Amino acid sequence: MQNTPVKLLDVVALLEDKPAEGLVAGQVGTVVEVFAPGVFEVEFLDASGRRLVLVELKRAELLALKHEAAARRSRNQSDTHFSTQRREERRETQRRRTLCEPLRPLR
């Protein structure tokens, strides 16, 4: 999980307390600058959206957060595509069967 790359504007969580900055482990911030590989400036906000602190952190101090909902939505969209494709294949098979059936004599 720590191998996940951190990029500009990624949402991250702090892994350890930073008492000098008034931060505790678990607080969520946003990467606003990449200084060097593995060194980031992270902005932490309060509940009102006001900046609490802007602090430089190393990759080992951060957990990159991911949005599962987006991954789940993509999977559901591909499932829907697959279902639609299967439905179309069944319709085409039905159509071919209908076209290939011999005509029955009229009585």
Image: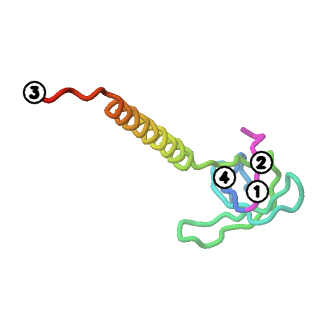
The type of residue carrying mark 1 is Lys
Of tags 1 and 4, the one toward the viewer is: 1
Q: Which residues are magenta?
A: 1-8
Task: Sort mark 4 into few (<14), some (14-19) or many (20+) by Cα contacts within 10 Å.
Answer: some
Report, in whole angstroms, how far the alpha carbon at label 2 lies from the one at label 3.
75 Å
Which disc, if any, is residue 24? 4
Disc 1 and disc 2 in contact, CB within 8 angstroms: yes
Position of 12 with respect to 55 (left or right) is left
**Which structural element holds mark 1?**
loop
Kindly identify the amino acid type of the residue bearing the numbered disc 3: Arg
**Quadrant containing the C terminus in the rendered view:** top left
Q: Which residue is mark 3?
A: 107
Give how far apart the Cα atoms at labels 1 and 2 are: 6 Å
Q: Secondary structure at mark 3?
A: loop
Marks 2 and 3, the one that precedes in the sequence: 2
Whole-percent x, y for residue 96 in the image? 38, 33
The disc placed on residue 7 is 1
Amino acid type for the residue under numbered disc 2: Pro
State which mark lies toward you, 2 or 4: 2
Q: Position of residue 9 (x, y in %)?
A: 70, 62
Residue at the left extreme, as displayed:
107
Is residue 5 found inside the magenta-colored segment of the image?
Answer: yes
Disc on the earlier residue, 1 or 4: 1
